[in-house]
Amino acid sequence: MKSCHPPSVAANVPGTEVRPEPHLHRGHVRASTLQPRTSRSRIYPSRNVKIHRENVPTAKLELYGSSCNGFAIAHSDLDISLTLTDHPTDESINSIEIIDTLAEKLKRMPGIGNIQPITSAKVPILKFVHYETQIEGDISLYNILAQENTKMLGMYAAIDPRVKVDNLINQVLVHLG
């Protein structure tokens, strides 16, 4: 299993991410409010290794999205892409069946809840919540393009710190929406 070790959202402050202050409205964020980014790293390695090694030995889980490229804020979810090493593409697999089966497996895992398989979407996903941290997660299948976009945005942010600021402003505006 591959982990992305996400960079910090706050420039020059390793291991932190921007968190909203409780007295502000949802989506209002002050860059001065920083907390350690330990909660995401607690969810991914331990829980998800168990999911695929016990049930689908050929499964490969990879993080993508804001948790990997350094754009995560307090309301960001954990995006996970599942691929099968014995299937190079998703053409010959039954995505709906895999999502439904995975949902049943997650329902039996302690600390994971609010499991919602969304199989009618163009890209079927499985939504869940990690109760201890209250972080929401999405598992999708073969989301290779999103993984590449995550890497690209991370590189842009590494080249020019204004990219992170612009992204943070966009996220705040979306939450105000």
Image (tube, rainbow, N blue to C red):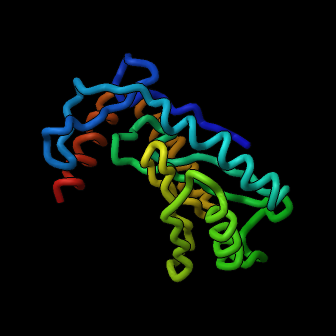
Depth check: give the residue in front, 102 or 5: 102
Can residue 159 be seen here?
no
Residue name at image x 45 percent, y 30 percent: 37
Residue name at image x 59 percent, y 46 percent: 63
- Quick check: 15 above or below 103? above
Task: Tally the marks.
Answer: 0
**Percent x, y of residue 94:** 72, 78
- Residue 55 horizontal side relative to residue 139, left or right: right
Can residue 172 be seen here?
yes
Depth check: give the residue in front, 126 or 12: 126
- Residue 58 horizontal side relative to residue 162, left or right: right
**Residue, far bottom:** 120
Q: Which image quadrant is residue 46 in?
A: top right
- Quick check: 82 above or below 151? below
**Percent x, y of residue 13:** 38, 18
Depth check: give the residue in front, 101 or 164: 101
- Quick check: 47 above or below 93? above
Quadrant into which the N terminus falls? top right
Quadrant into which the C terminus falls? bottom left
**Percent x, y of residue 105:** 69, 65
Residue name at image x 48 percent, y 36 percent: 39
Residue name at image x 49 percent, y 30 percent: 38
- Residue 77 horizontal side relative to residue 173, left or right: right
**Percent x, y of residue 109:** 65, 57
